[in-house]
Image (cartoon, grey):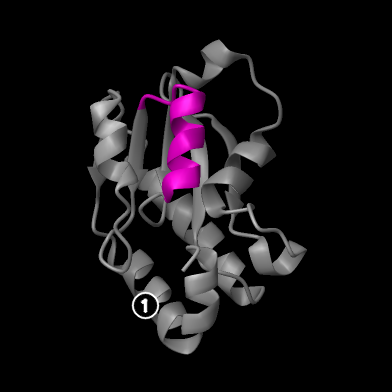
Amino acid sequence: MDGKWDDKGMEIAYEEAAQGYAEGGVPIGGCLIRNSDGHVLGRGHNMRFQKGSPTLHGEISTLENCGRLAGKEYKDTTLYTSLSPCDMCTGAIIMYGIPRVVIGENVNFKSPGEEYLAQRGCVTKVVADEKCTAIMKKFIDERPGDWFEDIGE
């Protein structure tokens, strides 16, 4: 888990976030990459507004788009996400035993999930990606009510 796929993973996460924003949704995107060979198992973005879903956050959408995987397959992956994962998404990461998470930014939102992931043995890395920070700030400034709904406030 040396991070050799980090640039690729973060580029996909940002592409997904931008797609979500273009669709009128929350600009949070992600992907799941197998560490051993860089294969993208799935990618997705927050679809709460597009699908009227209370739970389809970016990380959950990513996992959904991976389809069914054997439990052992998650143990050789990194989840890339454009924003610090909320408690719900943190729970999914822990449930499937994903050993590493790379986070685009945690300036606009820093979840307590980051510390919890570390406590549970998940390696977390924040890359402070300027594009991820900018698109999230733009969304929050334009649609603060929708943002607060997304994080349950």
Q: Residue 71 lies in what quarter of the image?
A: top right
In magenta stretch: residue 97? yes
Which residue is painted at 49% across and 60% down in the image?
28
Which residue is painted at 55% across and 58% down in the image?
16
Highlighted magenta segment, given as a residue range: 86-99
Of helix, strand and loop, which one carries label 1? Answer: helix
Tell me where residue 3 appears, x and y as whole percent.
Answer: 28, 33
Q: How many marks?
A: 1
Quadrant location of the N terminus? top left
Tell me where residue 11 appears, x and y as whole percent.
Answer: 43, 53
> What residue would you read off at disc 1?
137
Q: Amino acid at mark 1?
A: Lys
Query: Residue 45 vs residue 84: left or right?
Result: right
Instruction: Indicate whether 123 appears above or below 11.
Output: above
Which residue is painted at 41% across and 86% down in the image?
141
Q: Residue 113 lies in what quarter of the image?
A: top left
Tell me where residue 109 appears, x and y as whole percent.
Answer: 33, 63
The rendered magenta stretch, by its main secondary structure, is classed as: helix
Query: Residue 93 vs residue 133: left or right?
Result: right
Instruction: Indicate whether 79 appears above or below 122.
Output: below
